[in-house]
Image: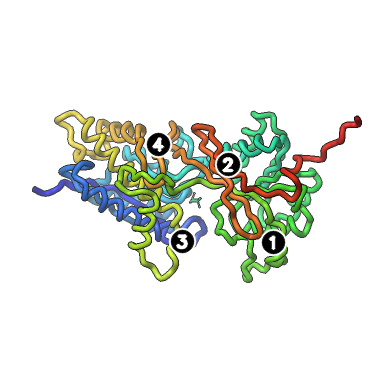
Amino acid sequence: NELIPLTFGALFPMESSAGGWAGGPACLPAVEMALEDVNKRQDILPGYRLQMNTSDSKCQTGLSIQQMYQFIYNDPKKLMMMTGCSTVTTVISEIAPEWKLVVLAYGASSPALSNRERFPTLFRTHPSATIQNPTRMRLFEKWKWKKVTILSSVEEVFVSTAKDLEKSCSDKGIRVQRQSFFGDPADAVKTLKRQDARIIVGLFYEADARRVLCQAYKQGVYGRKYVWFFIGWYSNTWHIPPFEEHLNCTSDQMEIAAQYHFTTESLMLSLDSTPGVSGYTGNQFKNRLIERVDSDRSPGEMGGFPEAPLAYDAVWALALALRCTIRALPQNVKIEDFTYKNEAVAGQIFDCMKNTSFQGVSGRVMFSDQGDRIVQTQIEQMQDGKYQLVGYYDMTTKNLTWMGKEKWFGKGPPPDSTIVRQQI
Ligand SMILES: CC1(C)CO[C@@H](CC(=O)O)CN1
Protein backbone atom coordinates (compact mmCIF):
# COMPACT_ATOMS: atom_id res chain seq x y z
CA ASN A 1 0.00 0.00 0.00
CA GLU A 2 1.26 3.43 -1.02
CA LEU A 3 2.76 5.71 1.64
CA ILE A 4 0.91 9.03 1.95
CA PRO A 5 3.32 11.92 1.21
CA LEU A 6 3.65 14.77 3.74
CA THR A 7 5.43 17.72 2.12
CA PHE A 8 7.15 20.84 3.50
CA GLY A 9 8.72 23.76 1.66
CA ALA A 10 12.41 24.45 2.32
CA LEU A 11 14.52 27.47 1.32
CA PHE A 12 18.31 27.17 1.18
CA PRO A 13 20.73 30.06 0.54
CA MET A 14 23.04 28.29 -1.91
CA GLU A 15 24.96 31.54 -2.48
CA SER A 16 24.71 35.04 -1.07
CA SER A 17 25.44 37.47 -3.89
CA ALA A 18 23.63 40.19 -1.94
CA GLY A 19 25.65 39.55 1.24
CA GLY A 20 24.24 37.42 4.02
CA TRP A 21 24.86 33.77 4.82
CA ALA A 22 25.45 31.16 2.11
CA GLY A 23 24.68 28.18 4.33
CA GLY A 24 22.87 25.99 1.78
CA PRO A 25 25.81 23.94 0.43
CA ALA A 26 26.18 21.98 3.69
CA CYS A 27 22.63 22.41 5.12
CA LEU A 28 20.77 21.01 2.07
CA PRO A 29 22.61 17.64 2.11
CA ALA A 30 22.14 17.52 5.90
CA VAL A 31 18.36 17.93 5.43
CA GLU A 32 18.28 15.31 2.65
CA MET A 33 20.15 12.89 4.95
CA ALA A 34 17.66 13.57 7.77
CA LEU A 35 14.73 12.87 5.40
CA GLU A 36 16.26 9.50 4.48
CA ASP A 37 16.88 8.71 8.16
CA VAL A 38 13.30 9.64 9.16
CA ASN A 39 11.68 7.75 6.27
CA LYS A 40 13.60 4.52 6.92
CA ARG A 41 12.28 4.38 10.47
CA GLN A 42 8.95 2.57 11.10
CA ASP A 43 8.29 4.36 14.39
CA ILE A 44 8.34 8.02 13.29
CA LEU A 45 5.68 8.50 10.56
CA PRO A 46 4.28 5.00 9.80
CA GLY A 47 2.11 5.02 6.66
CA TYR A 48 3.55 8.36 5.54
CA ARG A 49 6.60 9.52 3.61
CA LEU A 50 8.10 12.89 4.54
CA GLN A 51 9.26 14.89 1.49
CA MET A 52 10.27 18.46 0.67
CA ASN A 53 10.13 20.94 -2.19
CA THR A 54 13.25 23.14 -2.17
CA SER A 55 14.27 26.47 -3.68
CA ASP A 56 17.52 28.47 -3.65
CA SER A 57 16.62 31.69 -1.79
CA LYS A 58 20.09 33.20 -2.41
CA CYS A 59 19.44 34.76 1.01
CA GLN A 60 17.25 37.34 -0.78
CA THR A 61 13.89 38.42 0.67
CA GLY A 62 12.09 39.28 -2.60
CA LEU A 63 13.09 36.03 -4.26
CA SER A 64 12.13 34.00 -1.19
CA ILE A 65 8.61 35.50 -1.07
CA GLN A 66 8.13 34.64 -4.74
CA GLN A 67 9.29 31.09 -4.00
CA MET A 68 6.92 30.87 -1.02
CA TYR A 69 4.01 31.69 -3.32
CA GLN A 70 5.18 28.96 -5.73
CA PHE A 71 5.15 26.48 -2.82
CA ILE A 72 1.66 27.52 -1.74
CA TYR A 73 -0.07 27.85 -5.11
CA ASN A 74 1.29 24.61 -6.52
CA ASP A 75 0.46 21.12 -5.28
CA PRO A 76 1.28 19.23 -3.17
CA LYS A 77 0.13 21.21 -0.13
CA LYS A 78 3.00 22.16 2.19
CA LEU A 79 2.54 21.44 5.90
CA MET A 80 5.39 23.72 7.06
CA MET A 81 8.16 26.06 5.84
CA MET A 82 11.86 25.66 6.59
CA THR A 83 14.18 28.68 6.14
CA GLY A 84 17.86 29.71 6.50
CA CYS A 85 19.01 33.36 6.63
CA SER A 86 17.62 35.84 9.15
CA THR A 87 16.45 38.25 6.42
CA VAL A 88 14.50 35.54 4.56
CA THR A 89 13.19 34.09 7.84
CA THR A 90 11.89 37.55 8.81
CA VAL A 91 9.70 38.02 5.73
CA ILE A 92 8.58 34.36 5.47
CA SER A 93 7.67 34.27 9.19
CA GLU A 94 5.63 37.47 8.82
CA ILE A 95 3.48 36.10 5.98
CA ALA A 96 3.35 32.38 6.92
CA PRO A 97 0.47 32.81 9.43
CA GLU A 98 -1.77 33.94 6.52
CA TRP A 99 -1.67 30.29 5.45
CA LYS A 100 -1.48 28.98 9.03
CA LEU A 101 2.04 27.67 8.39
CA VAL A 102 4.64 27.05 11.07
CA VAL A 103 8.15 28.25 10.06
CA LEU A 104 11.20 26.32 11.24
CA ALA A 105 14.50 28.22 10.77
CA TYR A 106 17.80 26.31 10.84
CA GLY A 107 20.06 29.33 10.11
CA ALA A 108 18.55 32.50 11.60
CA SER A 109 20.44 34.22 14.42
CA SER A 110 18.84 37.67 14.50
CA PRO A 111 17.59 38.68 17.99
CA ALA A 112 14.74 40.61 16.31
CA LEU A 113 13.14 37.25 15.48
CA SER A 114 12.40 36.58 19.17
CA ASN A 115 9.04 38.32 18.85
CA ARG A 116 5.75 36.39 19.01
CA GLU A 117 3.73 39.47 18.01
CA ARG A 118 5.55 39.79 14.66
CA PHE A 119 6.37 36.10 14.15
CA PRO A 120 3.58 34.11 15.80
CA THR A 121 4.47 30.70 14.29
CA LEU A 122 8.30 30.86 14.11
CA PHE A 123 10.60 28.28 15.74
CA ARG A 124 14.32 28.06 15.15
CA THR A 125 16.90 25.35 15.80
CA HIS A 126 19.56 28.10 15.35
CA PRO A 127 20.08 30.10 18.57
CA SER A 128 19.66 33.86 18.68
CA ALA A 129 22.91 35.85 18.74
CA THR A 130 21.91 37.09 22.22
CA ILE A 131 22.53 33.59 23.61
CA GLN A 132 26.20 34.57 23.97
CA ASN A 133 25.38 37.43 26.35
CA PRO A 134 24.74 35.32 29.49
CA THR A 135 28.17 33.74 28.83
CA ARG A 136 29.86 37.17 28.56
CA MET A 137 28.09 38.27 31.76
CA ARG A 138 29.29 35.15 33.56
CA LEU A 139 32.91 35.96 32.61
CA PHE A 140 32.56 39.61 33.74
CA GLU A 141 31.38 38.19 37.07
CA LYS A 142 34.20 35.62 37.21
CA TRP A 143 36.82 38.31 36.70
CA LYS A 144 34.97 40.93 38.78
CA TRP A 145 34.67 43.55 36.00
CA LYS A 146 32.12 46.28 36.72
CA LYS A 147 32.84 48.49 33.71
CA VAL A 148 32.48 47.17 30.14
CA THR A 149 32.48 48.80 26.68
CA ILE A 150 30.53 47.44 23.72
CA LEU A 151 31.62 48.25 20.17
CA SER A 152 29.37 47.09 17.32
CA SER A 153 28.91 47.72 13.63
CA VAL A 154 25.54 49.11 12.54
CA GLU A 155 23.90 45.88 11.29
CA GLU A 156 20.63 45.18 13.12
CA VAL A 157 21.78 41.75 14.35
CA PHE A 158 24.77 43.35 16.16
CA VAL A 159 23.01 46.49 17.43
CA SER A 160 20.20 44.40 18.96
CA THR A 161 22.74 42.00 20.51
CA ALA A 162 24.65 45.02 21.90
CA LYS A 163 21.46 46.51 23.36
CA ASP A 164 20.58 43.17 24.97
CA LEU A 165 24.06 42.97 26.56
CA GLU A 166 23.86 46.61 27.65
CA LYS A 167 20.58 45.90 29.45
CA SER A 168 21.97 42.77 31.12
CA CYS A 169 24.98 44.77 32.33
CA SER A 170 22.83 47.61 33.69
CA ASP A 171 20.55 45.11 35.44
CA LYS A 172 23.65 43.72 37.17
CA GLY A 173 25.03 47.13 38.14
CA ILE A 174 27.86 46.96 35.60
CA ARG A 175 28.70 50.35 34.08
CA VAL A 176 28.45 49.96 30.30
CA GLN A 177 29.33 52.23 27.36
CA ARG A 178 28.01 51.31 23.92
CA GLN A 179 28.89 52.70 20.51
CA SER A 180 28.56 51.55 16.90
CA PHE A 181 30.43 52.40 13.71
CA PHE A 182 29.86 52.06 9.96
CA GLY A 183 32.85 51.32 7.74
CA ASP A 184 36.05 52.80 9.22
CA PRO A 185 36.35 52.13 12.99
CA ALA A 186 39.27 54.57 13.56
CA ASP A 187 37.17 57.21 15.32
CA ALA A 188 35.33 54.56 17.36
CA VAL A 189 38.64 53.14 18.60
CA LYS A 190 39.80 56.67 19.43
CA THR A 191 36.66 57.05 21.55
CA LEU A 192 37.50 53.79 23.37
CA LYS A 193 40.81 55.38 24.40
CA ARG A 194 39.17 58.59 25.53
CA GLN A 195 36.68 56.55 27.60
CA ASP A 196 39.57 54.58 29.12
CA ALA A 197 37.81 51.39 27.95
CA ARG A 198 39.61 48.25 29.16
CA ILE A 199 37.11 45.40 28.77
CA ILE A 200 35.77 45.62 25.21
CA VAL A 201 33.12 43.43 23.53
CA GLY A 202 33.24 43.58 19.71
CA LEU A 203 30.12 42.70 17.71
CA PHE A 204 30.57 42.77 13.91
CA TYR A 205 31.27 40.57 10.89
CA GLU A 206 34.77 39.23 10.25
CA ALA A 207 35.99 41.94 7.83
CA ASP A 208 34.99 44.68 10.29
CA ALA A 209 36.74 42.74 13.05
CA ARG A 210 40.00 42.95 11.09
CA ARG A 211 39.62 46.71 10.67
CA VAL A 212 38.94 47.12 14.38
CA LEU A 213 41.91 44.93 15.36
CA CYS A 214 44.24 46.88 13.06
CA GLN A 215 43.07 50.18 14.55
CA ALA A 216 43.49 48.72 18.04
CA TYR A 217 47.11 47.96 17.10
CA LYS A 218 47.70 51.40 15.53
CA GLN A 219 46.22 53.22 18.53
CA GLY A 220 47.72 50.95 21.19
CA VAL A 221 44.39 49.56 22.51
CA TYR A 222 45.81 46.09 23.11
CA GLY A 223 48.13 44.30 25.51
CA ARG A 224 48.23 43.94 29.28
CA LYS A 225 45.69 46.67 30.12
CA TYR A 226 42.97 45.41 27.77
CA VAL A 227 40.73 42.38 27.26
CA TRP A 228 38.92 42.05 23.91
CA PHE A 229 35.91 39.78 23.32
CA PHE A 230 35.21 38.84 19.69
CA ILE A 231 32.56 36.57 18.13
CA GLY A 232 33.64 32.92 17.97
CA TRP A 233 32.15 31.88 14.62
CA TYR A 234 34.78 33.65 12.53
CA SER A 235 37.36 31.40 10.81
CA ASN A 236 40.31 30.37 12.98
CA THR A 237 42.64 32.63 11.00
CA TRP A 238 40.29 35.58 10.69
CA HIS A 239 42.92 37.94 12.13
CA ILE A 240 45.35 37.33 9.25
CA PRO A 241 44.76 40.19 6.78
CA PRO A 242 43.82 38.98 3.26
CA PHE A 243 45.89 40.77 0.60
CA GLU A 244 42.83 42.16 -1.20
CA GLU A 245 41.63 44.05 1.89
CA HIS A 246 44.72 46.32 1.84
CA LEU A 247 44.64 46.50 5.63
CA ASN A 248 47.62 48.58 6.69
CA CYS A 249 48.64 46.09 9.39
CA THR A 250 50.93 43.10 8.96
CA SER A 251 50.03 39.59 10.15
CA ASP A 252 52.54 39.95 12.98
CA GLN A 253 50.99 43.24 14.12
CA MET A 254 47.52 41.66 13.99
CA GLU A 255 48.68 38.64 15.98
CA ILE A 256 50.18 40.93 18.62
CA ALA A 257 46.92 42.90 18.91
CA ALA A 258 44.89 39.67 18.97
CA GLN A 259 46.95 38.03 21.71
CA TYR A 260 44.83 36.61 24.57
CA HIS A 261 41.44 37.86 23.28
CA PHE A 262 38.42 35.70 24.15
CA THR A 263 35.61 34.49 21.90
CA THR A 264 32.15 33.11 22.67
CA GLU A 265 30.01 31.06 20.29
CA SER A 266 27.06 28.67 20.30
CA LEU A 267 27.84 24.95 20.44
CA MET A 268 26.09 23.56 17.34
CA LEU A 269 27.40 19.98 17.43
CA SER A 270 26.56 17.79 20.44
CA LEU A 271 29.62 16.51 22.34
CA ASP A 272 27.46 13.80 23.90
CA SER A 273 28.76 10.28 23.22
CA THR A 274 25.26 8.80 23.55
CA PRO A 275 23.29 8.79 20.27
CA GLY A 276 20.23 11.03 19.98
CA VAL A 277 16.76 10.26 18.68
CA SER A 278 18.20 9.75 15.18
CA GLY A 279 20.44 6.94 16.45
CA TYR A 280 23.56 8.99 15.72
CA THR A 281 25.91 11.09 17.88
CA GLY A 282 27.04 14.55 16.79
CA ASN A 283 30.37 13.19 15.56
CA GLN A 284 28.77 10.28 13.68
CA PHE A 285 26.48 12.82 11.97
CA LYS A 286 29.48 14.98 11.05
CA ASN A 287 31.39 12.02 9.56
CA ARG A 288 28.31 10.87 7.61
CA LEU A 289 27.87 14.38 6.19
CA ILE A 290 31.53 14.58 5.15
CA GLU A 291 31.15 11.18 3.42
CA ARG A 292 28.03 12.37 1.65
CA VAL A 293 29.31 15.66 0.26
CA ASP A 294 32.74 14.34 -0.82
CA SER A 295 33.37 17.77 -2.37
CA ASP A 296 36.85 18.65 -3.61
CA ARG A 297 36.92 21.52 -1.11
CA SER A 298 37.59 20.52 2.49
CA PRO A 299 34.15 19.98 4.10
CA GLY A 300 34.91 22.57 6.79
CA GLU A 301 35.05 25.15 3.98
CA MET A 302 31.52 24.31 2.76
CA GLY A 303 29.02 27.10 3.39
CA GLY A 304 26.87 26.26 6.39
CA PHE A 305 29.03 23.32 7.62
CA PRO A 306 28.94 24.47 11.28
CA GLU A 307 25.15 24.94 11.10
CA ALA A 308 24.46 21.60 9.31
CA PRO A 309 23.59 19.83 12.63
CA LEU A 310 20.90 22.48 13.19
CA ALA A 311 19.41 21.75 9.74
CA TYR A 312 19.50 17.99 10.34
CA ASP A 313 17.74 18.41 13.70
CA ALA A 314 15.15 20.75 12.15
CA VAL A 315 13.87 17.85 10.01
CA TRP A 316 13.64 15.66 13.13
CA ALA A 317 11.77 18.43 14.98
CA LEU A 318 9.38 18.69 12.03
CA ALA A 319 8.90 14.90 11.77
CA LEU A 320 8.31 14.47 15.51
CA ALA A 321 5.86 17.40 15.53
CA LEU A 322 3.92 15.79 12.67
CA ARG A 323 3.90 12.44 14.53
CA CYS A 324 2.63 14.22 17.65
CA THR A 325 -0.06 15.92 15.53
CA ILE A 326 -1.21 12.66 13.92
CA ARG A 327 -1.56 11.09 17.37
CA ALA A 328 -3.41 14.12 18.78
CA LEU A 329 -5.93 14.71 15.97
CA PRO A 330 -9.44 13.27 16.44
CA GLN A 331 -10.11 10.05 14.50
CA ASN A 332 -12.04 11.79 11.73
CA VAL A 333 -9.38 14.47 11.05
CA LYS A 334 -6.35 13.44 8.98
CA ILE A 335 -3.12 15.46 8.86
CA GLU A 336 -3.21 15.18 5.05
CA ASP A 337 -6.48 17.19 5.22
CA PHE A 338 -4.38 20.31 6.02
CA THR A 339 -5.63 23.07 3.70
CA TYR A 340 -3.87 26.34 4.73
CA LYS A 341 -7.20 27.24 6.32
CA ASN A 342 -7.75 24.25 8.58
CA GLU A 343 -7.28 25.70 12.07
CA ALA A 344 -7.59 22.27 13.77
CA VAL A 345 -4.59 20.73 12.04
CA ALA A 346 -2.51 23.97 11.98
CA GLY A 347 -3.17 24.63 15.67
CA GLN A 348 -2.16 21.10 16.58
CA ILE A 349 1.08 21.32 14.57
CA PHE A 350 1.95 24.55 16.42
CA ASP A 351 1.21 23.04 19.84
CA CYS A 352 3.25 19.93 19.05
CA MET A 353 6.19 22.04 17.78
CA LYS A 354 5.99 24.20 20.93
CA ASN A 355 6.45 21.07 23.09
CA THR A 356 9.45 19.78 21.13
CA SER A 357 12.03 18.12 23.36
CA PHE A 358 14.50 15.56 22.01
CA GLN A 359 18.25 14.81 21.92
CA GLY A 360 19.50 15.88 18.49
CA VAL A 361 22.94 15.82 16.88
CA SER A 362 23.18 19.52 17.83
CA GLY A 363 22.31 18.85 21.46
CA ARG A 364 18.97 19.09 23.32
CA VAL A 365 16.34 20.52 20.95
CA MET A 366 13.81 22.64 22.85
CA PHE A 367 12.28 26.05 22.18
CA SER A 368 11.60 29.02 24.46
CA ASP A 369 8.16 30.72 24.42
CA GLN A 370 9.47 32.98 21.61
CA GLY A 371 10.42 29.85 19.65
CA ASP A 372 14.14 30.38 20.36
CA ARG A 373 16.66 27.54 20.54
CA ILE A 374 18.57 27.16 23.81
CA VAL A 375 22.12 25.81 23.39
CA GLN A 376 25.36 25.72 25.34
CA THR A 377 28.14 28.15 24.44
CA GLN A 378 31.87 27.61 24.06
CA ILE A 379 34.61 29.99 25.22
CA GLU A 380 38.05 30.12 23.58
CA GLN A 381 41.13 32.30 23.95
CA MET A 382 43.65 33.13 21.23
CA GLN A 383 47.15 32.21 22.41
CA ASP A 384 50.05 32.90 19.99
CA GLY A 385 47.73 32.84 16.99
CA LYS A 386 45.91 29.62 17.93
CA TYR A 387 42.53 29.24 19.66
CA GLN A 388 42.60 27.34 22.95
CA LEU A 389 39.31 26.00 24.35
CA VAL A 390 38.99 27.45 27.86
CA GLY A 391 35.41 26.72 28.92
CA TYR A 392 31.71 26.00 28.29
CA TYR A 393 28.65 27.77 29.70
CA ASP A 394 25.12 26.36 30.05
CA MET A 395 22.68 29.23 30.60
CA THR A 396 19.83 26.95 31.70
CA THR A 397 21.82 25.42 34.59
CA LYS A 398 24.03 28.55 34.92
CA ASN A 399 26.93 26.09 35.01
CA LEU A 400 30.39 27.33 33.87
CA THR A 401 32.79 24.49 33.01
CA TRP A 402 36.27 26.03 33.23
CA MET A 403 39.51 24.40 32.08
CA GLY A 404 41.90 26.90 33.71
CA LYS A 405 43.86 27.20 30.43
CA GLU A 406 43.53 30.96 30.03
CA LYS A 407 46.66 33.16 29.95
CA TRP A 408 47.25 36.77 30.95
CA PHE A 409 50.01 39.30 30.29
CA GLY A 410 50.29 39.87 34.02
CA LYS A 411 49.54 37.66 37.02
CA GLY A 412 45.79 37.63 36.32
CA PRO A 413 42.94 39.51 34.63
CA PRO A 414 43.57 43.27 34.29
CA PRO A 415 41.32 45.75 36.16
CA ASP A 416 38.29 47.16 34.28
CA SER A 417 39.55 50.73 34.69
CA THR A 418 42.25 52.85 36.25
CA ILE A 419 42.22 51.80 39.88
CA VAL A 420 42.76 54.85 42.05
CA ARG A 421 45.14 53.51 44.69
CA GLN A 422 43.52 54.04 48.08
CA GLN A 423 45.83 56.30 50.13
CA ILE A 424 46.73 54.00 53.06
C1 LIG B 1 26.56 31.76 13.34
C2 LIG B 1 25.96 32.28 12.05
C3 LIG B 1 27.04 32.53 11.00
C4 LIG B 1 25.22 33.59 12.31
O1 LIG B 1 24.44 33.98 11.18
C5 LIG B 1 23.48 32.98 10.74
C6 LIG B 1 22.79 33.47 9.49
C7 LIG B 1 21.75 34.55 9.73
O2 LIG B 1 21.42 34.85 10.90
O3 LIG B 1 21.27 35.09 8.72
C8 LIG B 1 24.17 31.67 10.46
N1 LIG B 1 25.03 31.28 11.56
**Residue picked out by circle 2:** 402
Is residue 245 in view? yes
Mark 4 or 3 closer to N-term? 3
* Vertical comparison of 269 with 206: above or below: above
Q: Nearer the viewer, mark 3 or mark 2?
A: 2
Secondary structure type for disc 1? helix
**Residue picked out by circle 3:** 300
Quadrant for residue 356, please give it: top left
Task: Find residue 227 and report its horizontal and vertical position in percent.
Answer: 70, 47
In the picture, the quarter occupied by the C terminus is top right
* Residue type pointed to by label 3: Gly
Mark 2 or 1 closer to N-term? 1
* Residue that appears at 44% across and 56% down: 304
**Residue picked out by circle 1:** 254
* Residue that appears at 35% across and 38% down: 358
**Residue picked out by circle 4:** 366
Q: Are marks 3 and 1 in contact (CB under 8 Å)?
A: no
* Vertical comparison of 394 with 10: above or below: above
Q: Nearer the viewer, mark 2 or mark 1?
A: 2
Task: Find residue 90 and report its horizontal and vertical position in percent.
Answer: 45, 45
Q: Residues within 10 Å of mark 2 (few under 14, many from 20)?
A: few
Q: Residues within 10 Å of mark 3 (few under 14, many from 20)?
A: few
Quadrant for residue 126, please give it: top left
Q: Nearer the viewer, mark 2 or mark 4?
A: 2
Residue toward you, 2 or 250: 250
Q: Are marks 1 and 4 in contact (CB under 8 Å)?
A: no
* Residue that appears at 55% across and 59% down: 235
Secondary structure type for disc 3? helix
* Residue type pointed to by label 1: Met
**Whole-number angstrom distance, CA of label 2 to CA of label 1:** 27 Å
Mark 3 or 2 closer to N-term? 3
Q: Are marks 4 and 3 in contact (CB under 8 Å)?
A: no
